[in-house]
Image (cartoon, helix red, strand yellow):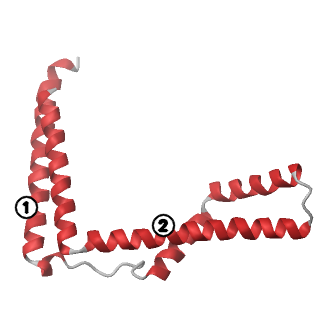
Amino acid sequence: MIEPAAAPMRWIAVVVLVGLAVHTAVTAVRHHRDPARAARPDSGLSTPLRAYGGLLGLTLLNPMTIVYFGALVLGRQASDGLDSGGEVLFAAGAFLASASWQLLIAGGGRLVGRLLAGSRGRLVTALLSAALIAALALSTALS
């Protein structure tokens, strides 16, 4: 029942994907040639401190993080004979490890974002995206 419509639908998908690839590439080149056209509003996470705070807030609100640290603390209480001071040091160490990881992610993201947010970075990213979409269209056409 689906077989008669499969070939026409595949070719429609190919046409749409090729159109999307061409549109992406043309728009990227236009924006690269005329940077005023590509102007974007400043994002809310534009400074490293804001990016870190946003990422830290998301981590703290993540229910899996709460469950993980809860299980970790309760599991340590069951298996270790730590006194209250040891438990406080353990919690502080876990917090510092998490905070340093968040700082690394936020700083790395900011660095990569700075590289990709420039005119050349946006052009390369968009052209790679267009090439990937075109490859998907070719794969669909050949299947």
What numbered label is drawn on residue 26? Answer: 1
**Vertical order, 3 against 21 (above or below):** above
Is the C-beta separation of discs 1 and 2 under 8 Å? no
Sequence-first disc among 1 and 2: 1
Position of 85 compared to 109: left or right? right
Frontmost of labels 1 and 2 is 2
Mark 2 lies on residue: 105
Q: Amino acid at mark 2?
A: Ile
Q: Amino acid at mark 1?
A: Val
> What percent of the width, then of the height, locates residue 138?
12, 36
**Vertical order, 17 against 22 (above or below):** above
10 Å crowding of disc 1: few (<14), some (14-19), many (20+)? some
> What percent of the width, then of the height, locates residue 18?
10, 45
Name the residue nearer the viewer: 75 or 130: 75
Name the residue nearer the viewer: 33 or 95: 95
**Vertical order, 98 against 6 (above or below):** below
Position of 26 compared to 136: left or right? left
Q: Secondary structure at mark 1?
A: helix
> What percent of the width, then of the height, locates residue 72?
75, 54
